[in-house]
Image (cartoon, grey):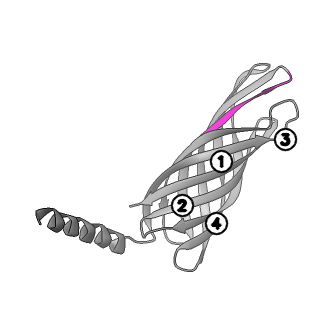
Amino acid sequence: MKFGKHLAATLLTVVSICAEADDRGLYVGGGVTRVETDEHALGDSDSSYKAFAGYRLNQYLAFEGAIVDLGSFSGDGKEFEGHSVQAAVHLGVPVGDRVRLFASGGVHAWDAEEETAGDDNDLDLTYGAGIEVDLFRNVGVRLEQEVLKVGDIELDQTSASAYFLF
């Protein structure tokens, strides 16, 4: 009987937190990415990860920072391995109560190791588009496609992520 009361109290608390959540505020998330390149001298794709945090001002505007593993590619005697730190603005359009389409634009500082060119780093632009679905008021999933320029190489990054809105 005591267990039932504790379970009911816990469920009531969780439902209250979900009901109190707003479409604005701090959020954190992470997921897996698939990075592809059309550089013919390198392998064409690799899996990696993305971790992000941001602040959603409202349903239409958010600011976000991310850390991304750009993966490893090799082929024709060349090897590439890179990482990226990103800052972006997300402009969104709500579709119903729980779905949001968005476009993103920003900059990313990347660091890459190429066997032929050695270590290199720079600051380049990044842009993309995606869709977010709020499963609950403060938990959601996201699918996005981004384009990142890394020196002479253009990378296409597809991410599937989950996020928690505080």
Q: Nearer the viewer, residue 33 or 150?
A: 33
Q: In the image, which is nearer the foreground, mark 4 or mark 1? A: 4
* First of labels 1, 2 by sequence position: 1
User: How far separated are the C-alphas under marks 4 and 1?
Assistant: 17 Å
User: How far separated are the C-alphas under marks 4 and 2?
Assistant: 13 Å
Q: Which residue is mark 3?
A: 38
The segment highlighted magenta reads: 67-76
Numbered disc 2: secondary structure: strand
* First of labels 3, 1 by sequence position: 3
Specify the farthest residue to the bottom.
Answer: 96
Name the image quarter holding the C terminus.
bottom left
Cβ–Cβ below 8 Å for labels 2 and 3? Answer: no
User: How far separated are the C-alphas under marks 3 and 1?
Assistant: 21 Å
As shown in the figure, which amino acid type bears the numbered disc 1?
A: Val
* First of labels 4, 2 by sequence position: 4
Residue 82 horizontal side relative to residue 31, left or right = right
Residue drawn at the location 67% of the way across and 34% of the way down: 71
As shown in the figure, which amino acid type bears the numbered disc 4?
A: Phe
Residue drawn at the location 21% of the way across and 65% of the way down: 7
As shown in the figure, which amino acid type bears the numbered disc 2?
A: Val
Q: Which residue is mark 1?
A: 107
Name the image quarter holding the N terminus.
bottom left
Circle on res. 141: 2
- Whether residue 21 is situated above or below residue 74 in the rendered picture: below
Residue 104 visible to the viewer: yes
* Image-quadrant location for residue 17: bottom left
Cβ–Cβ below 8 Å for labels 3 and 1? Answer: no
Q: Position of residue 73 (x, y in %)?
A: 74, 30
Q: Which residue is mark 4?
A: 102
